[in-house]
Amino acid sequence: MSPFAHITGWGMAVPQRIVTNAELALRIDTSDEWIQSRTGIRERRVASEDQTTASLGVDAAQRALDMARLKPADLDLIIVATSSPEHIFPATACLVQDRLGASKAGAFDLLAACSGFIFALNMGTQAIRTGAVKNALIIGAETLSRIVDWNDRNTCVLFGDGAGAFVLQASPEQGGVISAVMRSDGSGGDLLILPGGGSRIPATHKSVQAGQHYVQMNGREVFRFASRVLGQATEEAVKKAQLSLDEINLIIPHQANQRIIEAALRGLDFPVERCVINLDRYGNTSTASIPIATCEAVQQGRLKPGDKVVFVGFGGGLTWGAAVVVWSAPLPAARRVMPYRYRLYARLRSMIKRLMRRLDVLVWGRRNPYL
Ligand code: UT7
């Protein structure tokens, strides 16, 4: 029988800096009252100058590995879901791989906007179910504060920075991620878009002057789409898992807007008490919102081993999806590992590799020693 993909470690990292609605109201034409009543958001975290999408991802990953008692070198696969990658390439996942010292892992980014974490969770699960991969690291990490226009009140009040990570491990025990659905509709691509900086509209003085390097959104249309698909995806994933909604202990939705979540719950006739909402403190952290909310739910004792939980998200693309998971505990570890020690090893290894590359050039010049 094919192995099951269990979530055996989880971790989150958010910047320390808190930006309240009142602080935003000092800079743009908005108010705490408007933001809270239309979205539920009170404050969000904003990365400091030295924090990046990869550094937040590494911090979250380290905690998840610590929880799973897994060495970075045990990882076979790293997927970073992000809407604010450090570069178009190299993948942010490769930067994370290097800093963790995950020397045996293949690493790539997955771009499905705010649904990215669900899609990555499903991809990691499928890789484990085939037997090709034993240990996978799934990260949602964002520094959206760098790609929003802080003068655009339609978008800047909504987003925040942060990261969350899950370790997925193969196990013969039934459970873990038991179903998932992924959907897309590219006809709505223009509703939530970062138009510039790609190959279609390369960065130029003109594109920057026009603000095309910032997130643009048709909020009303995204709202309508999201309220509809959140419930639909939940129902589909639950059905695929051969369960009924009554058997679901907790729903952890993408944290974009309290009104969207409440509308979806009403449609499902699902009690709001069995849903995790923490967007009041973090805003919309895109791919990071679901793993951050999960970490807090576990910490608060709202999610225990054996519980059945639905993760459900939506976002630009348009994309949406859901997964049903039987929550696990960390697998029994064969040995004690100290993941923080590996950070130092990883740094050293990376430095030595860079140095060797330079030496190679010094010794061989432009000649290729392999020819
Ligand atoms: O991960 C997915 C990411 N995106 C989302 O989830 C966004 C989904 N959409 C939403 O959450 C909501 O549509 C918003 C929160 C963006 C807007 O709420 P709304 O109730 O749909 O407001 P609206 O777009 O209908 O705008 C109402 C008014 C407009 O003024 P007029 O045109 O009626 O005069 C806006 O200009 O509110 C104005 N407005 C603001 N006022 C104060 C828009 N943003 C602000 C603001 N402060 N920050």
Image (spheres, rainbow, N blue to C red):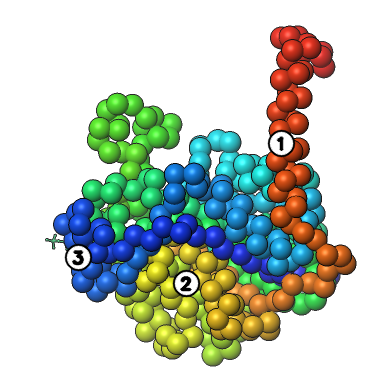
Q: Residue at x 69, y 73 (%)?
A: 176
Q: Which of the marked residues, 1 or 2, is nearer the chain's N terminus?
A: 2
- Name the quarter showing ligand 1: bottom left
Q: Give coordinates of residue 141: x percent, y percent.
A: 52, 54
- Tell me if I can see residue 229 in this picture: no
Tag shown at residue 201: none
Which residue type does callout 3 highlight? Answer: Ser
Which residue type does callout 2 highlight? Answer: Pro
Cα distance, mark 1 to mark 2? 37 Å
Q: Secondary structure at mark 1?
A: helix
Count of marks overlaid on the render: 3
Q: Give coordinates of residue 120: x percent, y percent.
A: 60, 57
Q: Would you name the residue on which mark 1 appears?
A: 350
Q: Would you name the residue on which mark 3 appears?
A: 31
Of the 4 image quadrants, the one containing the N terminus is bottom right
Q: Would you name the residue on which mark 2 appears?
A: 253
101 versus 125 height, above or below: above
